[in-house]
Image (cartoon, helix red, strand yellow):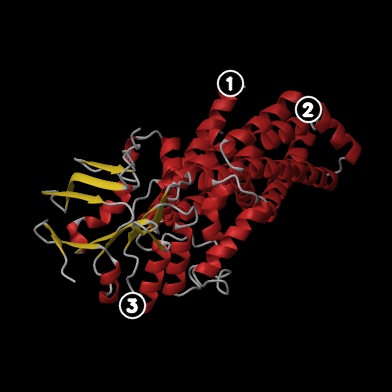
Amino acid sequence: MTTPHAPRPLVFEHVPLGRDASQSFTLEIPAHHTVAVLGDEDSGLGALGSYALGLDRPPAGRVLTFDTDVAALPDRERLAFRRRVGYLPAGEGLLQNLSLRDNIALPLRFGSDASPREIDGRVNVMLAAVRLAAGGHLRPAQANEEERRRAALARAIAFDPSLLVLEQPFDGLTARVASELLELARGGESAEGARRTIFITGQEIPPLLLRRVERVYRLTRAGALEPETV
Amino acid sequence: MRAATQLTAAGRAVAVRIGINQVRFTALHAVGLVTLLSGILSFLVISQATRELGRIGATDLIGTLIVVAIVRELGPLITALVVAGRSGTAIAAELATNQVLGEVRALEGMGIDPKQYLVLPRFAGSLISMFALLVVFDLVAVLAGYGAASLNGMSGARYFDIVRASLTYKDVWLTVFKALAFGFIVGVVPSYFGLAVRRAPTEIPIAASRAVVSAIVGIFLCSALFVALG
């Protein structure tokens, strides 16, 4: 009897990056690993998250999420597929006219058949997990950066995804808060490593976190991907 | 319409809540303005008509004036212009802001169809509001016409007899179809222009302006089409 092949969480193959798209980016994110790719704003790495979710299609090469080219899926299937991946976009992407609590509940309301009571219960658990129980009623504009980031992370893990894509998740946060959020994102430890696979893009991550990230790469200005020395 | 049928129960509840808010802003908050415009327009037209038509003994024609000119033609047109000016701008600016703040992308990243969350409730709200405001416009127009006719010596019974005799089922259906068609234009055109914005905040006022101009042009063209077909 053969073991079925487990889909690879995230693979970038020969994806052009940078302003002139002259460099090819290839990287596989192994399951249960936390991998960070750091680089300058103009390196083009800001597009990697949207490629992973099929929000944009790379001009060449391919991006496979759980062995699926998400951008090639039909509309409805593409939306449904994205619920398998947690996403914290740069700038959080919280809806300004909703409270932090309603922002966390939103994907559950639109993407699950759970009853309102079940959704409320799940949101209460999420709020407590990200230490936002007292601030859930705040609108994003009334909350501070740390509260917004906590809410955005809670929203990203609302469906308890096995893959998380985090864009600039730690910018503007203290090392302590960043460390706490990373632990939440990892979802605890399993025999293979973290319970979730995490792909982080950003300009920097706090040095304190480098030990908890299995692989850190830096995208150089020349477009080369170099392992970051810890 | 397909987007509506694919909503989950909790998602439908959210969409209904947004739709109700839209109706409150689009219809309820515009009742005063529509009442004022309808009342003044009808009062002026019927006052002048009663005087001028009275000289040649053709006061029966004020029924045609009320029904054809005001209820069937000007009522839908003026109501649609009010809704386009107030709510069309708001819808376009709101959706454009959602787009610029990255909220639309975040929704897509969470697996939520922006058409379901952003467009559908506003579209439904516009249809309902347009219809409700048109009923208000026509009722006020008939009542203001009664006031004007009374001031110019016509009895109430005679006025209402003339109006009732001039009103046909065709007028009622045409008015209903116009309300739906104009509501469709005011719901869809600003949503399209709002979501067409890319990333720059400077695009927001441009989108709002284009949305209103296009909606007004659409309303006039549609009105002309109704006359041509009717």
Q: CA distance from mark 3 to mark 2?
A: 78 Å
The residue positioned farthest toward the front in the image shown: A1
Which residue is disc 3 drawn over? Answer: A175
Position of A184 with respect to B87 (left or right) is: left
Foreground of the two, A177 or B141: A177
Q: Nearer the viewer, residue B184 or A230?
A: A230
Question: Disc 2 designates what residue?
Answer: B166
Q: The residue marked by circle 2 belongs to what chain?
A: B
Residue at 48% x, 55% y: name it: B94
How far apart are labels 1 and 2 at the CA level?
20 Å
Q: Residues within 10 Å of mark 1 (few under 14, many from 20)?
A: few
Query: Split into 4 quadrants, where in the image is the C terminus of chain A?
Result: bottom left
Read off the residue under disc 1. Answer: B229
Q: Amino acid at mark 2?
A: Ser
Chain of the residue where label 1 is placed in the rendered structure: B
Q: Name the one closer to the observer, A187 or A68.
A: A187
